Amino acid sequence: MKRILLPALLALSCLGANAKTVVIDVRTADEFAAGHLDGALNIDHQVIAQRIGMAGVAKDDEVILYCRSGRRSAIAAETLKGMGFKRLKDYGGLEDARQKLKK
C-alpha cells in the first residue's frame, strides 16, 4: 500500500508546484499604456480566450483580473471560467485592484 500511496501523494503535491499568480489588466492597450499595476499583463477582455495561452497562463495558475470599473473583468472571468480556469479572482476596477493587492 505504501508503494502506491507515496507516488500518488508526490504527484498530487507537484500539481500546484508550478502554479503562479498572474495579474491581468483586461482593458485596451491604450488604457493599459496610460497606467496599470506593476507586473500586470495586458490582455483585452474581447480576445482573452484566444490570447491567454499565448501569454503562458496555465489553468492551474491563480488569475487576478481587473479593468476600469469591473464590468470587463467580470466578462473575462466568465470567459475563463468557461474554459476551465478555476482559480480566478475578479478585483474589479484598477483602484480596487491596487488596494486589494496592497494587503
Image (cartoon, grey):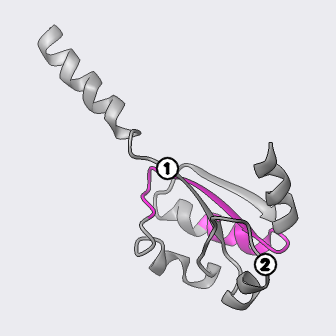
Q: Quadrant of residue 71?
A: bottom right
The one of 50 and 25 positioned closer to us in this rendering? 25
Q: Which residue is mark 2?
A: 35
Q: Magenta stretch?
A: 57-78
Q: Quadrant of residue 34?
A: bottom right
Going by the image, does 24 lie left or right of 31? left
Residue 41: x %, y % from top left: 59, 71
> Residue most toward the front?
38
**Would you place residue 53 above or below residue 11 in this image?**
below
Residue 55: x %, y % from top left: 45, 72
Local crowd size for mark 2, using a 10 Å CA cut-off: few (<14), some (14–19), many (≥20):
few
Residue 81: x %, y % from top left: 55, 60
> Residue most toward the top?
1
Residue 60 painted magenta:
yes
Q: Are marks 1 and 2 in contact (CB under 8 Å)?
A: no
Going by the image, does 89 lie left or right of 13? right
The one of 51 and 22 positioned closer to us in this rendering? 22
Quarter of the C terminus within the rendering: top right
Residue 7 painted magenta:
no
Q: Which residue is mark 1?
A: 20
The one of 87 and 13 positioned closer to us in this rendering? 13
